[in-house]
Amino acid sequence: MQLDTTPQPTERTAAVPPAREPQRGADRQIGFSELKKWLRHRHPMIYIDRITDHEPGVFLRSLLSVSGNLDAIAGHFPERAIYPGSHLMQAFAQSGIILYQLSTSPLADDELTLIGSVKSRFTSPVVPGDQVVFDVRADRLVGTTFFFSCQATVDGLTVAAFRGTLTRRKVSDLGRQLW
């Protein structure tokens, strides 16, 4: 289902419909090689391993497997390995970027997504051996601004919650490019 991007006369935002039961027989998983096609990021900046389920305009569920061999773990912290919260936020953002594109259209070659804001709350440390599930919800779409939220869990227990916004912009609209 596509998000309704047409402004209503009495509303400023388009509400996203509630989640529905998965369609029987539909393959709603996206593996690592395929999900890389939806992101501009490359190694070592891709944080999600797989999309386990999704419905455009409604939700996306992604998976992050935390290994003790990750560079981030080696220095955070040597005496007590904890996966950095900033990396959890990046995995949330990447999941949102994919849901945004699945809900609207893929990015053109001359477009980027920009994160507008993120509110986060961390409730429990994530450690090597954990598999983090990001349950991302499309909240609404106003023009080119995508509002989304997420609950991150490990073994069914909440470890973090996020709210954020994304927008898509043409690279030429961003001014002089120093890269």
Image (spheres, rainbow, N blue to C red):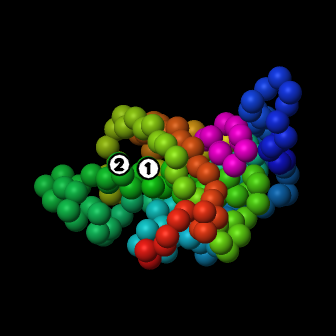
- Which is nearer the eye, 20 or 7? 7
Quick check: 131 left or right of 137?
A: left
Q: Which residues are magenta?
A: 139-148
**Residue 85 bears which disc, if any?**
2
* Nearer to the camera, 51 or 175: 175
Instruction: Establish if 108 lies above or below 56.
Output: below
Disc 1/disc 2 C-alpha distance (Å):
6 Å
In which quadrant of the rendered view does residue 30 lie? bottom right
Identify the residue shown where x is 27% and y is 52%.
82
Q: What is the number of the mark on residue 89? A: 1
Instruction: Give amino acid for label 1.
Output: Met
Rendering coords of residue 75 (x, y %):
20, 62
- Residue 10 quadrant: top right
The C terminus is located in which quarter? bottom left
Given residues 5 and 55, the one toward you in this image is: 5
Q: Is residue 145 in the magenta section?
A: yes
Residue 152: % across, % down:
49, 43
CB atoms of marks 1 and 2 within 8 Å: yes
Q: Residue 58: which numbered mark, if any? A: none
Q: Position of residue 90 (x, y in %)?
A: 45, 55
| Residue at (65% x, 45% y) in the render | 146
Give the dominant element type of the magenta stretch: helix, strand or loop. strand
- Measured from the top left, where is residue 109 in percent x and y? 67, 74
Residue at point 55% right, 63% down? 174
Q: Residues within 10 Å of mark 2 (few under 14, many from 20)?
A: some
Q: Is residue 146 above or below residue 171?
A: above
Is residue 153 visible in the rendered image? The answer is: no
Tell me how many marks there are.
2
Can the viewer see residue 122 in this picture?
yes
Residue found at the far left of this picture: 79
Q: Amino acid at mark 2?
A: Gly
Label 2: state its secondary structure.
helix
